[in-house]
Image (cartoon, rainbow, N blue to C red):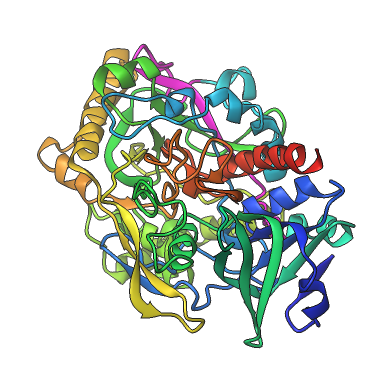
Amino acid sequence: MILESGNDFAALLSRKVRVCIIGAGAAGISLACELDGCGFEVRLFEAGARANHVGDFYEGSATPPHPEPRQFRRVGFGGTTAVWGGRCVPFDPIDFERREYLANTGWPITYDEVARFYPAAMEYCDAGRFDFLTRTSLPGAEAIIRGFKGDEVVDADHIERYSLPTDFGRRYRRQLQKSANVTVMLGLRCLKLNRASGADMIESAEFIDQGGHLHTVRADTFVLATGGIEVPRLLLASDRAGSGFGNVGDCLGRFYMCHFENTLGRIVPHNSPVAFRFERTDDGVYCRRQMRFTPEAQHAHHLPNMVFRLHFPSYSDAAHGSSVMSAIFLAKSALLPEYRAILQQQTQVPASPRLPHVGNVLRDLPGLARFTAEWLFRIRLASRKLPYTLVANADGSFPLEFNSEQTPDPSNRITLREDLDRHGLPQVHIAWRVGDQDAQAVLRAFLLLRESLGRSGAAQLLLDDELLAGQIARSIPLGHHMGTARMASSPRSGVVDGDCAVFGLPNLYVASSAVFPTCSHANPTLTIVALAIRLAQHLRSRLVS
């Protein structure tokens, strides 16, 4: 059943339930769906309504170049999956290891404990089967660059898969509407978790509806299924007199991680074809190729986990000669602010004046018309959409995009400001930077990749060695907020245990990328869903028995 603010909630909210889930994004909806039919009463609360919006819930501040807290986040049923690009990538076994050369790494659970839930997570995300190898997903396909199949340093046999993209609110609305034991309550924002007097447990949660009325919800078990910024915000705000729930080791809000990325250098292939565009796997899912480093190379060269992708040229440089890219550049004001910022990130070449871009458009109106038809039928109208537009450079070279893991650093953190939002919750401040160690590691990675491509004779990687280090240091974070309530083996080194229960409060769980001790290079959504399914299994076994 799904109810919206404006209904008479009083009678329903007065009854204690077994499980209260706070937040209806990918984690909360997956968890609720897994608990559908479990035999006990579950409530799923979402601050927004059916339609997603940015709203003013996320006002705050951030240290540049980190985007301000409103970006890459949405309020509403489905959460940020409403604007999700759909990229699905699992974590790797090395991500769970304690790596001596990367501080604060290691999970208290193994890769296998998460990987067994990836196939089910793939189904939730509509991303096909759990297979991320080129040779098995694209049988018989050419190498990413003809003549380059990778070596002992570079692995060129991996892909990333793409969801529909799946808006979880739309995709799972019908199942939850029909559920006999799960009630979704929209337009109710959680303001505080209340600890029971004299007991190590959460007794209730306080909510405010869209009419400004306060409600107290009691439950046996609470699950905080908000994102990597909202989780520490609520845990800190609920215990203003103390240091925050689960914060014995002063880890709450710390170790904040974002992937950082940039587009640097150019790959010049010596042979054709090059696997640049989107391909379809043998089970019908869009995918793209990656280059990454082998686990052995990561250990030997002290590298964080990262991937490289062949990229399109800068939209802003009219020298690309593309009517499509110039049209997108001229229309960039129509893009979402988050994606407009990514588009504008490519600053190796200054933006061209508008006139050359207009010239590109006028010289190839038929090409622009073909693109418009493709955009309409393959991106807007198709049920499985082409993820985004890829236009090759006119000179046959390919800018190189990297996306890197970030070393968990306690000085990267979420803290509360004195300023309050309209519901009285403290706004957040985000302190974030790319560490010198990570920037130097990415620099080594580019040089290693150049050597590997050169040995193969398949391509050249052209880099400006004098400028490269500075360009890497100026890389921007992606909208992936992780690590602020990290999973650990003890309360001194984290906020939640291996079952995602908050230390010291065993009836409070966190289903969120906030629990990630490390962030891999992988977009977090698939692993968020896998951990939510794993948590559902744990709750079923604990609450049914």
Using residue 365 as the reference point, say whether residue 457 is left or right of it.
Answer: left
Queried whether the magenta region covers residue 167, the answer comes back as: yes
Q: Which of 466 and 51 is in front in this view?
A: 51
Quarter of the view holding residue 266: top left
x and y, in percent, of residue 491 in the image: 42, 41
Residue at 48% from the left image edge and 60% from the top image edge: 235
| Left or right: 246, with 393 as reference point | right
Query: Which quadrant of the rendered structure holds the C terminus?
Result: top right
| Magenta-tinted stretch | 143-169
Question: Residue shown at 51%/47% (left/top)?
Answer: 504
* Residue situated furthest bottom in the rendering: 211
Residue drawn 41% across the image and 42% down it: 494
Task: Tell me: residue 11, above or below residue 447.
Answer: below
* Residue 497 pos. (x, y %): 51, 39
Q: Give the vertical position of 438 relative to 479 (above or below).
A: above
Image coordinates of residue 363 in percent, x first then y, are 42, 61
Residue 520, x across and y down, in percent: 42, 35
| Residue 173 visible in image | yes
